[in-house]
């Protein structure tokens, strides 16, 4: 009787844990795509000799361009840091559970497993929040850098 009352809690813990893992996988995909895009933009900027030659002719344009480029490099740094953030806690160690079961330990394995999944969820929440903050910094830094590089080009056209 007691276990049937605990079943909805187990199901909800598992549901939220699974949702959290899907969100975190989505974060990794976004980071990978954004880093690829940043690398393409950096390559395009640095390999364009004509643009670089133009930018270096005007001091204001060069300063704005340099700050923009540094901002994009900063975005790359935060993207890499977000991508290689700590490993997620996946929950109970299966090997330990099987060994305890083989040894005949009398435990309520539903509660043990649920507790380990809950603990993993709590730990992963802070890891995910940290990753989210780094992703935001990456996007903002890239946007600022892109705008500044565009402004440096506009200054060349206007002057």
Image: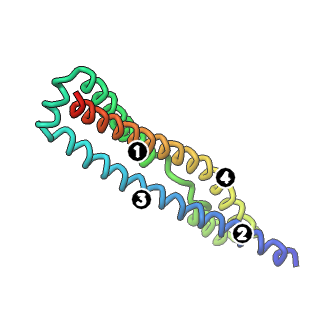
Q: Does 77 appear above or below 126?
A: above
Name the one closer to the observer, 61 or 44.
61
Residue 29: assigned label: 3
Can you identify the residue that label 4 sits on? 122
- Indicate the position of residue 18 as horizontal and vertical percent values: 59, 67
Of label 4 and label 3, which has the lower sequence position? 3
From mark 4 to mark 1, how far is it between C-alphas?
Answer: 24 Å
Q: Position of residue 2 (x, y in %)?
A: 87, 74
The answer to whether residue 106 is visible is: no
Nearer the observer, 124 or 156: 156
Q: Name the residue under label 2.
A: 12
Q: Is residue 70 left or right of residue 108?
A: left
The residue carrying mark 1 is: 79
Marks 4 and 1 in Cβ contact (< 8 Å)? no
Mark 2 vs 1, N-terminal side = 2
Question: Which mark is in front, 4 or 1?
Answer: 1
Q: Going 58% across and 66% down the picture, which residue do you hit?
A: 94
Q: What element carries label 3?
A: helix
Q: How crowded is mark 1: few (under 14 residues within 10 Å), some or many (20 or more)?
A: many
Would residue 159 be found to the left or right of residue 140 on screen? left
Which residue sits at x=53%, y=64%? 22
Residue placed most toward the observer, 20 or 36? 36
């Amino acid at each position: 009787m007691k276990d049937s009352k605990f079943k909805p809690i187990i199901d909800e813990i598992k549901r939220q844990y699974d949702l959290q893992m899907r969100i975190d996988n989505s974060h990794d995909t976004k980071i990978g795509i954004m880093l690829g895009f940043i690398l393409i933009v950096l390559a395009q900027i640095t390999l364009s000799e004509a643009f670089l030659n133009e930018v270096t002719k005007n001091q204001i344009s060069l300063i704005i361009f340099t700050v923009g480029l540094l901002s994009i490099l900063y975005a790359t740094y935060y993207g890499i840091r977000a991508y290689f953030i700590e490993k997620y806690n996946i929950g109970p160690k299966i090997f330990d559970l099987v060994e305890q079961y083989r040894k005949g330990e009398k435990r309520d394995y539903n509660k043990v497993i649920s507790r380990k999944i809950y603990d993993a969820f709590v730990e992963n929440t802070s890891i995910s929040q940290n990753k989210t903050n780094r992703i935001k910094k990456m996007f903002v830094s890239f946007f600022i850098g892109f705008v500044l590089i565009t402004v440096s080009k506009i200054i060349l056209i206007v002057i």
